[in-house]
Structure formats: structure tokens, C-alpha cells
Amino acid sequence: MDNALKTLADCIENPRPLRTSRDCLTGIVRSKAASGEELFPDIFGLDHEKRRCLEILAGGRGVLLTGEYGVAKTDLARHIVDLLNELFVREPLLYVERCPVQEDPALLVDYIVKGEGCGVLPCPICRKMIADAEGDYTTIGVGTRHHLVEGAGFSRVQGGGDVLPEEIIGTYNLLKLSEIGDPFDPRVFEPGKIGQASRGVLFVDEIGKLPETAQHALIQAAQEYIVTPSKSRETFPVDFLLVATTNPVDEEYICGAVRDRLVSLSIPLVSFDDELHIVRKELGRIQPAVYLPELYLSLAVATVRALRSDERLELGPRASINAAFIARSSALFEGRSMVSFCNIKEGIFTAILGKALYEDKQDVERAVQDAFPSIGPYLQKHIEGVDLERILRKYCGDGEVNAQTLKEHIAGSDNDELSRFAGWAYHNETIHKFRMYEVLAEYLSAYHRGCPSGELHGRP
Ligand SMILES: Nc1ncnc2c1ncn2[C@@H]1O[C@H](COP(=O)(O)OP(=O)(O)OP(=O)(O)O)[C@@H](O)[C@H]1O
Ligand SMILES: [Mg+2]
Ligand SMILES: [Zn+2]
């Protein structure tokens, strides 16, 4: 049916209720809940926070996400846009084509029927189009949108001292006005971030870093659902979900009035297992794929977490992600498609030291060394029920650990130590089974080099 709605005249013939961004959010959450689908499958943990965030927004309030660096505040905001887009793919967003704040045609229909007594007064540009149409509403185009895009249903304000209120609330371009001469021409009005966000999401990153004037400009629109651009007395109806973020250190710079009008939600650090998921997800995004053995991944996350209480470092999940990324590059430089122990050690040290100030570097390096486990015992502890030392003695007697040799031995043996090791790897690693032997060989050679007894193969 939506395809048939090309002009305002079609919308008058097929009246539809007004659909706000809150209604849309509620609609998609309900439909996903009914089908048992995850709301944000790419955001791990934070079950309560994800739900509360949506409850606040659907309740018509702006949400202020607070939390340490890298806890997915920005990511959460982005996913809200994705969530709405899931709905719009199925039920497109209808908007008035030349309206600078992409109003819902239902709002114009209501105005045509009820005049000034309507619920929400359309913007001056739409009212002018209606007046000019003289009853022939086929002249007013209606568009359909399947995706909110930056500038149309999504906009982002990055907190900073130089953001001007008019960038947020929009303004009249007086130069264009003098050229065109018609104040109601859509080209004369520059909608600003709020106008661009209308019908979707306005994301304000680091709201505490905005000047007070800009903070106030935001909040009036969020509260009254109208915006009055600078150099104008006209008001534009706007309808958006406001998602703001702040780091705890900047919280005190958020004006009281602004804070009072937002509902704040603190986003905690996730569990160890969820942090593993996060790193895996991020690594999975980049090509060429390089495999990070699971025990090296957990080594990176465990080391980062062990040092997380060190206030000099601010080690959020990004530090774990960085460790994995640096390890990956290190492997690629060596022409490998699997991260070795040396690669991950390099990644962990570089990522953590990269968070230290120059004056703290040496001290932090010692702290990482202390937190970094001895790899031999570490591997043996996590590869339960398998005696790595026995495998080394039996199959790698000459000191060479070779994936091909291991594969041949496994084919010829049954249920000994080596096949138990392979069984462990099948359960715990996520690499394709054809390459499992490479993982076994990697662990064995790392164990060999970091062997606690120091006796093996005459190594000191
Ligand atoms: N719970 C999580 N689930 C999935 N990914 C996560 C999670 N937490 C963090 N990440 C990932 O970590 C990275 C940092 O997240 P993001 O940029 O959203 O953090 P932030 O809270 O906005 O950080 P900052 O305070 O520095 O702005 C992103 O790549 C994000 O995908
Ligand atoms: Mg962020
Ligand atoms: Zn309009």
C-alpha cells in the first residue's frame, strides 16, 4: 500500500495514523520480542542496560549513557538507528518530500482537516506548500525511506567547545534568502543537527564537552518537540530520539537543567567472557582473516583486565581489541595467518604501554611483566586433562614441533595424549578443523619455549 502513496492527495485518501519515532521504536522492539530475536545481537552482555535504554527512549525521554572509555556507548547509539532501520525495511518511513524536517504526511493531513486546531502545527514551509496547493494536494510529493541515513533521520553532534547553537537548531541562510527572495523556499532554511535527526535519532557524543548554549539549544527541542532556528521566529516540529553520552570525568560539565531532562544510564564493563566475544567480533570484521588461538585471546583479555584497576591506564575493552589487532599485524608481517605466542605478547605489551604516559612507561612495563603469566604453566592449566610435556617428549623428540607431523601421528594413533589434545582443540577453538593441527603445533611450541621445568630438550 505504501507504494501507492506518492503525494499528499494519496495520503488524504488513505489516512494513516501519525507514527512518531517512539512509536517506531516500540513497534520494532515488540516485534523482535515476540519472535524471540535479540535486540542488539552485536552488543554483548549489558542485558539490563540495553533494555532500559530502549524503555527510556520509547518513553519519550532522552537517554544519557555514562561509562568508562570504550564500553560501547557510541556503539549502542548506532545500534538504535539500525534497529529503526530494521522496521523501515519492512514498513517504510513516509515523509513530505520538500519538508526540511521530513515531517510525517499524517501531520499535514491533520492540519488540512482541522486547521490551526490540529495536534501539531506543520512547519512553515509545509504550511506554505499547502496554501499554494489550493486544494490540489497532488502537487505535494510524499517520499518513502527504507533507511535512516546521516543527514536524514540521523545526525551526530560531537561535543567540543566550538559547537555553535545554530549548528544544532538550524538557521536561515540570509544570503540564499536574498537570492531566492522567498523565506519559505526550503533552500533558505538550513535545518541543523536537530532538523536532520527528525524522525530518527540525534546522537550527541560527549555532551558535557558542549558549551552551555549548545546544551540548552538541544534540550529545548528534546523537551518540546519543536525547534526555533536562529534568525527566525518560526517553529519547526521535530520528532527524534535523543541519545547522549558522557565519560564520568565530563559529567560535572553537563548543565543541571540538561541533566535533569535526560535519564542517565550507566554502562558497566562487561564480563570476561563477553570481552572475549567483543575482541573476536572486532577481529572478524577485518580481512585478511588471521586466526587468534583462543588461549592467546584469553591471555590478552586476562592481562588487560588484571591491570584495569591501574588508574593511570584507563584500560577499557579497546585495549584488549588493540592487543589483538597489533598481534594480527605482527603475524601478517611474518607472513602468517595465525597469531603466534610472540605476536600476542607483542600485541599485549604494545597495547597496554600505549595507554601509559611517557613518565609512567617503565613502571607500567614492569606491571605488565608481573601480570603476564609464564606461558608454559598457563597453557598447561587451561588445556585440561592433557599432558603437554608428554606429547612433546613423544612426538617432538627432536625439538621440532611440526603441524604436518602431528597430523600424521594423530591419524595413526587412537585415544592417546595427542588425540585427547586434538579433541580439546575441536571443542575450544573456532578455526576450521583442517587447520587444527596448526593450533596444536603453535601451543606445543610455545609450551616448549616457555617450559617451566627448563629440562626439555636441554633448553636453559
Ligand atoms: N558490550 C560490547 N559489545 C560489543 N562490542 C563492544 C562492547 N563494548 C565495547 N565494544 C566495542 O569496543 C569498541 C569501543 O566501543 P565504543 O566506541 O562504542 O565505546 P564508547 O563507550 O563510545 O567509548 P568512548 O568513551 O571512548 O567514546 C567498539 O569497537 C565496540 O564495538
Ligand atoms: Mg564513544
Ligand atoms: Zn514541514
Image: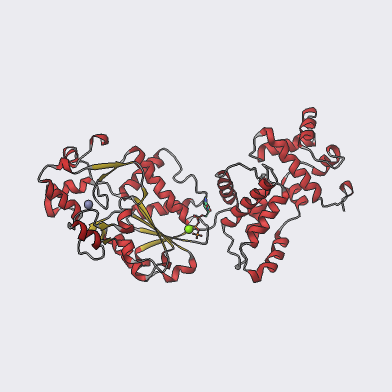
User: Residue most toward the front?
Assistant: 179
Q: Closer to the camera, 233 or 292?
A: 233
Residue 86 in which image quadrant: top left
Q: What x and y, as percent, mark residue 132? A: 12, 49
Residue sitting at 33 percent across and 70 percent down?
213
Residue sitting at 31 percent across and 40 percent down?
92
Does residue 438 sit above or below 218 in this rendering? Answer: above
Residue 77 visible in rendering: yes
Q: What x and y, as percent, mark residue 47? A: 48, 50
Q: Closer to the camera, 432 or 125?
A: 125
Q: What x and y, as percent, mark residue 219? A: 32, 64
Q: What x and y, as percent, mark residue 334? A: 70, 46
The scheme the figure's colours follow is secondary structure
User: Residue most toward the top?
Assistant: 412
Residue sitting at 39 percent across and 48 percent down?
81
Q: Is residue 208 left or right of residue 444?
A: left
Quadrant (top left, top right, bottom left, bottom right) of the N terminus: top left
Does residue 361 sit above or below 49 in this rendering? Answer: below
Does residue 381 sit above or below 160 in this rendering? Answer: above
Q: Closer to the camera, 309 or 199?
A: 199
Q: How many marks?
A: 0
Q: Closer to the camera, 377 or 9?
A: 9
Residue sitting at 73 percent across and 56 percent down?
373
Does residue 242 sit above or below 435 in this rendering? Answer: below
User: Residue most toward the left?
Assistant: 134
Q: Is residue 384 left or right of residue 247?
A: right
